[in-house]
Image (tube, rainbow, N blue to C red):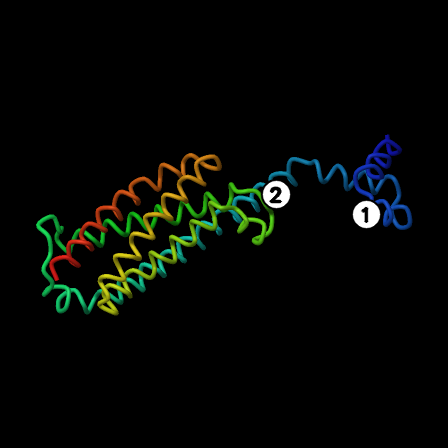
Amino acid sequence: MPCVAAAAARQFQPGILAFGEKHLSDKKIEFWIRVGHSKVFQTLLHILDLIEKWLLLVKFLLLVSLIGWVGAITTKTEIPLWYANLHKPAWNPPNEVFGPVWTLLYIIIAIVGWRLWRKVPGRSKLEKFKSRAVQFYFIQLFLNAAWSPIFFGMHRIELALIDIYMMIIFVVLTMRAAKPVDIVSFWLLAPYLAWIAYASTLNAAIVWLN
């Protein structure tokens, strides 16, 4: 039996073989192979994988929360003054609606980023960024982050309209690229797309009326 274990180590673990031939006996090699296949060791690996998985979600939540925080800081002082004096369309919702809607959407956006990052092929960040789904996701996220500073901070409502149209395009591209990778992400982006399409009509109407 020790010889069989040693043969397996030599076949599948050439790096260990070189070290093992000089420093390890067949019994020690067999011992470490058993450790690697033990339930305790496999459970530990599973726990570490879960920790890594949920930490990745936390990172995406923090990233999206930062974008939401920047938007909130930009709009807070402008809503009661500059924005209140703009002419708006009849379908413009109360200001209280935007906060809860965007909070929910930002959570969805973070979950989509987390799922896509885990689903696309590649082990390194560089390999994952080669995925069109990941590329389009981060482009639309950048456009999302830019809209509030452009609209509320710079008062460039025409430029903000271009930004939101570009955002719609890249959300659609993200959905298209995500569909074969993760169908859940595809459908999670649907309410986000619907909302920014609606928001674009508000932006366009404000440009027209002002």
Q: Is residue 122 left or right of residue 81?
A: right
Task: Note whether 64 is above or below 39 in the view shown.
Answer: below
Q: Quadrant of residue 161?
A: bottom left
Q: Quadrant of residue 29?
A: top right
Instruction: For the N terminus, give its image quadrant.
Output: top right
> Looking at this view, is 61 or 5 the one in front?
61
Q: Residue at x 33, y 53 (%)?
A: 166
Task: Note whether 164 is above or below 156 in the view shown.
Answer: above
Q: Position of residue 189 (x, y in %)?
A: 35, 42
Q: Earlier in the sequence, mark 2 or mark 1?
A: 1
Q: In the rendered image, which residue does mark 1 sit on?
A: 15
> Looking at this view, is 201 or 180 the one in front?
201
Q: Amino acid at mark 1?
A: Gly
Residue 45's mark?
2
> Looking at this view, is 159 or 154 the one in front?
159
Q: Residue at x 82, y 38 (%)?
A: 9
